[in-house]
Structure formats: C-alpha cells, structure tokens
Image (spheres, rainbow, N blue to C red):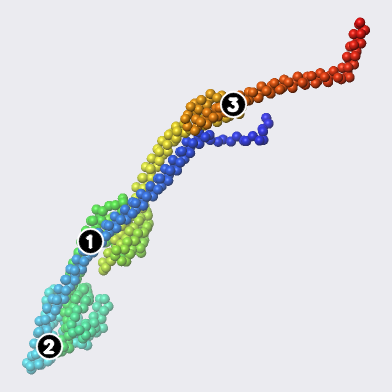
Amino acid sequence: MVVDPKSPRRHFRLTFSQRVPLGIALVLSLSGIVYTAVAVNAVTTSLTDQSEQEVSNVQAAISALVQIEYNDIVSYKTEALEKRKQSLRDTAAPIVASLDEFATAAANGELTTAQAQARSLDMVKNVRFGDDDYFFVYDLDLNAIGHPDDRIQGRNLADMQDADGRYLLREARELVLTQGSGYLDYNWERLDGALPAPKIGYMFLYEPWDWLVGTGVYVDDVDAEVQQRLTAIQSELQQTFADLTFAGDGFFLILNRAGEVIASGSPAVSVATQTSAGQEAIASILAAAPTEAGVEVTTTIQAPWNPDGDDAWRVQTSTTGGDLDWILVAAVNQEQLAAPARGLAIRMALIAVLVVLVGLVLGVLLSRRITKPVDAIARGATSLADGTFDPTTLDTAAQRTDELGDLARTFQTMGIEIVARERRLHEQVQQLSVQIDRAKVAAEVQEITESDYFQRLRSRSRELRDRDD
C-alpha cells in the first residue's frame, strides 16, 4: 500500500458536534468554580469581619463593665482610706490637747519639764483605740521615747527599714519638719508580732518639746474588702464567660500582666496553662496585647485549647488600662471559623455540578439543533468530493429558516449543479474518447497500408488475380 505523502495524517479529534457541548460544559464548569471561589471568599471575609465586630462589641461591653466595677472599688477604697485618715486626725486631737495641758503645767511650775514629759509619755503609751491601735513618740534623733512595744522602746531607729526597705522614721521626721503633720503609707508589724501589714500613719511635730508623735491604723481589712470585691467581679465574669459561646469553641479570657488567668470561658485554658505549650500561648498573647485602652490587636497563634490537638486560633485582645490593666482576650478556632465557608463551598460545588449537568444536557440538545445541519452539510461536502452526493440528504437542513437553512439550500443547489456538470463533462469525455479511438484506428490502418510489407502483399495479390484471369 502506497501512502500519498501529500495527504494529511489522520489523528483523533473531536467533531464539531462534540466540541460544542464540551465547550458549554467547560464554560459552565469554569463559571461555577470562579463563582464558588468568589462566594466562599466573600462568606469567609464576611464571617471573619462579623465575628471580629461581635467580639469587639462584647469586649467593649465587658471592658466598660469591668471598669465601672473597678471604679466602684477604687471609690470605696479611696473613701475608706479618707475616713481612716480623718479618724486619725480626730483621734490625735485629744492627744495634742493633753500634751498641751502637761506643757502648760510645766510652764506654770506645777510640774517640772521632766515630770510633764514623763507623764505625757506614759499617757501616750497607754492610749488605745480602734483595733488595739496606739500612739508612739520619737525625739528628733529618732529615739523611741514613748512606744508601747517593748521591742522598740528605748531604741534608736534611724536606720530601721520597713518590710518594703524604706527608712520609715527618716521619712516621718522629714515630713513633720517640712509640713508639720501628714500621712505615710507603710507596712508594719502588729503588737502581737504578726506579719507586717499595710498601715496608714498620721505624724505630727509637737513643737514645745520637739517630739515626733504619730499613730496609725491598719488597712489590710480595706485591702481584703477590695480583694473580695475583685474576686466577686472575677466570679461574675467567669459565669458570664461560661454562658458566652460564639464561633463553635470560641471563648473569652481575661489575663493580668503576669499571665495569670482572671476569668475564662474555657475549662481547657486552665488546664493548658499548666503545660509548656499553654504557657507559650499565654506569652504570645501578652507580647501582642496592647498597652492602651480602646486599642484592639488581632493575631493568630498556635494554642493547645482544643481537646483534639493543637490548632491555630485567631486571638483578639484589648486592655482595660489604668491601674487594673487586665487583658481581655477573645479566641476563635480558625478551623471552626472557616467551617461555614467550607460547608458553603461543598454546597455550591454540588450546585455547580448540577448546573453543569443540566447545562450539558441542554447544551447537547441545543447544539444538536445547530450541529445536525452542519454535520449534514459536512457529509454532503464529503459525498460531493467522492461522487456519492445525494441532494435529498440536505432536505431537512434546507427547511430551516435561519442562516444554516440558507447555507444548506445554497449548498444543495451548488451540489446539484456540480453533479450535473460532472455528468456532462463525463459524457463529453466519453465522446471525445470514442473519436480519439477511431482516429487512432484510421491512423494505424493507414500506417499499415503504407508500409513496404503491405505494398508487397498488395502487389503480390494483384499478380495472383491477373494470373487467374
């Protein structure tokens, strides 16, 4: 078998009737993919923005609530301490009056100065008020000349420091020498030898004898009340957080700057903080937390707060600011935040597949109306080329009223004319062949008759006829 080198190789290829529905399916598929991707991205962005806005609203409300409660506590503490200070001034007033009486008696000669001072010191040492609170007296060299605590009486305490390392009596002397009287906050042991406790002291200079006279009241009960109220706030927040759910496992958390959990809406947090991974997560939150109230920071961290394993968490932080300086934290599991978008993507993918299938079916039906007459015309062109053209095969396509119908009718007419022309040409060729064959025979006959051999035969034939005659 000899292959014509000019003829194109036959490769597998789709027909026009196959490419049209395939193209429709491809367009529908790409459209579905693009639409799904855009919709999923829009939903994810919308859910994220909505979640952040909801968290911001809740954080703002919690921050305002905490601040109000804390302001109440601060107001309580301020008022309580002011009352204690006023009570110290009121309590010290009779002591000053008694000292003035002794000083007057000494000035009038009723007592010697030494007697007046001794009786004054005995009187001051024995005064008690409140919760076994007392007065004390130092000279300006800071010798304890009138103190009810035998461990201190008679000692020079110029170099003594309180529990915080302050030279308390030096500060007291400076205070009374510059201001005459005033208040000091310090830590001091009780008379019963208990551990140092916070105390407010009122000091004044008794000028007639250059004495530093003072008294004080312990305020640990005020601090205890403050702590109790803070604990109540924490308990309320803990209950509030336990009832707050958002974005699946999302929860609220409050930390202080030391990383201690004040309140948490997730039991797993308290457990996780005991692990190194949990401590790292808390450290990451503290590092990113803002230092000013009204500022929100959003970060993503790895935290072991999901029982199923370590996950990425979207963390939104703010702070109450001020002296309290609590850090408000909202944590949302990234997987669960993206879950609605994934669900939407699956639903939309299924819808897209359904749309593609329906579109493909409709496309096939529609394309058949387009490609069927095109196929008929193509087959007609092929049959016209190999000489088997039948005009009736285009009758259905020629009945259409659109451009394909015009093309089919035109091709049908052209095909008929070409077939007729071919037929006429064939007949002409046949006639020409017959004429050519006759002329060829005559030429051959003439060639034979004119040959020497034929002439000799002809002459011989005459001789034979003449002899017979």
Q: Is residue 227 above or below residue 205?
A: above
Q: From this viewpoint, which residue is outermost toward the bottom? A: 109
Q: Is residue 131 left or right of residue 306?
A: left
Instruction: Give the CA distance from mark 3 to mark 2.
Output: 151 Å
Q: Which mark is residue 225?
A: none
Q: Nearer the viewer, mark 2 or mark 1?
A: 1
Rendered location of residue 56, percent (x, y): 29, 58
Q: Secondary structure at mark 1?
A: helix
Q: Is residue 197 above or below residue 34?
A: below
Crowding at dot 1, Cα within 10 Å, few <14 / some 14-19 / many 20+, comes out as some
Crowding at dot 2, Cα within 10 Å, few <14 / some 14-19 / many 20+, comes out as some
In this orientation, which residue lies closer to the viewer: 43 or 414? 414
Rendered location of residue 108, percent (x, y): 7, 93
The answer to whether residue 231 shows anywhere in this view is no
Q: Which mark is residue 65?
A: 1
Q: Where is mark 3, residue-wise? A: 417
Rendered location of residue 231, percent (x, y): 22, 62
Rendered location of residue 210, percent (x, y): 17, 88
Q: Earlier in the sequence, mark 3 or mark 2?
A: 2
Q: Is residue 239 above or below residue 378?
A: below
Q: Earlier in the sequence, mark 2 or mark 1?
A: 1
